[in-house]
Image (spheres, rainbow, N blue to C red):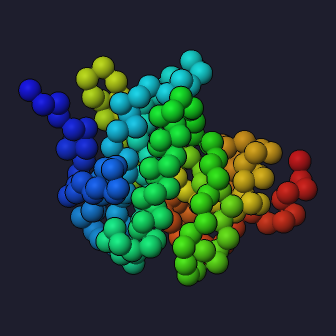
């Protein structure tokens, strides 16, 4: 009997997309203006070698929360950038590396437009915010799968996160009304003066 796919229990319409030799999931939310979720589908088949204190994060899937004005066609340069980035980071982790909430990855240069001009510096791994209910942890046989967002952040934000820790950074980030949704129009949640305060 074929194993049931974990994403079959997600609320909304899930479409499997083939990108090169890889497959990704696309969750179209019931209210389109809230955006769509592009996510990996097989990272959780691997138990990441996280330290024991973070054992609950050893089975994860990655996602981007795409804004509603982005094209969802694989031929779109921005959609292709998101897909390729997910696949690259997923394969990096499957090769024996690990990451937990608060980890940052290098951000590949976006292909065009305002998103490129925003000059984000890194991708921050964070827990779901806007889609917390839609992407709640999923019990699956002998494991629990957690979704983790990849969120673009500015260099100042990265510096503060590394200096003060993820919890303090997220307090400020959320206080500014920010979420995990890709948003090329947002400004940094960190002022220059904060970098020199300890």
Q: Residue at x 56, y 25 (%)?
A: 50
Nearer the observer, 54 or 129:
54
The x and y percentages for residue 46 are 41, 28
Q: Is residue 174 left or right of residue 31?
A: right
Instruction: Report the label total.
Output: 0
Choose top left, top right, bottom left or bottom right for residue 32.
Answer: bottom left
Task: Give whichever of 177, 157 is nearer the camera.
Answer: 157
Q: Is residue 159 left or right of residue 149?
A: right
How far across and how far down the image is residue 101, in percent? 57, 40
Give the percent coordinates (x, y) of residue 43.
40, 37
The relative height of residue 71 versus residue 194 in the rendered view (above or below) is below
Say which residue appears at 46% left-offset and 52% top-offset: 86
In the image, residue 36 sits, relative to residue 76, either above or below, namely: above
Seen from this angle, which residue lies furthest left? 1
Q: Looking at the image, can residue 38 be seen?
A: yes
161 and 5: which is toward the camera? 5
Residue at horizontal 25%, vertical 23%? 141
Q: Residue 139 appears at what percent x and percent y?
A: 29, 29
Residue 34, can we see it?
Answer: no
Residue found at the very far bottom of the displayed protein: 113
Q: Quadrant of the N terminus?
A: top left
Residue drawn at 42 percent across, 66 percent down = 80
């Amino acid at each position: 009997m074929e194993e049931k796919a974990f994403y079959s229990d997600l609320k909304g319409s899930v479409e499997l997309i083939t990108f090169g030799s890889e497959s990704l999931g696309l969750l179209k939310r019931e209210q389109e203006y809230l955006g769509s979720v592009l996510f990996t589908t097989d990272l959780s088949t691997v138990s990441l070698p996280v330290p024991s204190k973070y054992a609950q994060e050893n089975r994860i899937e990655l996602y981007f929360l795409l804004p509603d004005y982005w094209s969802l066609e694989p031929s779109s340069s921005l959609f292709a950038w998101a897909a390729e980035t997910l696949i690259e980071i997923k394969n990096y982790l499957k090769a024996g590396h690990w990451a937990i909430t608060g980890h940052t990855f290098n951000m590949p240069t976006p292909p065009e437009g305002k998103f490129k001009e925003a000059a984000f510096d890194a991708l921050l791994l964070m827990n779901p915010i806007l889609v917390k209910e839609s992407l709640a942890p999923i019990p699956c046989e002998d494991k629990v799968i957690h979704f983790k967002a990849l969120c673009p952040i500015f260099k100042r934000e990265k510096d503060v996160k590394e200096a003060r820790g993820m919890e303090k950074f997220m307090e400020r980030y959320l206080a500014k009304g920010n979420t995990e949704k890709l948003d090329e129009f947002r400004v940094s949640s960190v002022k220059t003066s904060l970098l020199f305060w300890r």
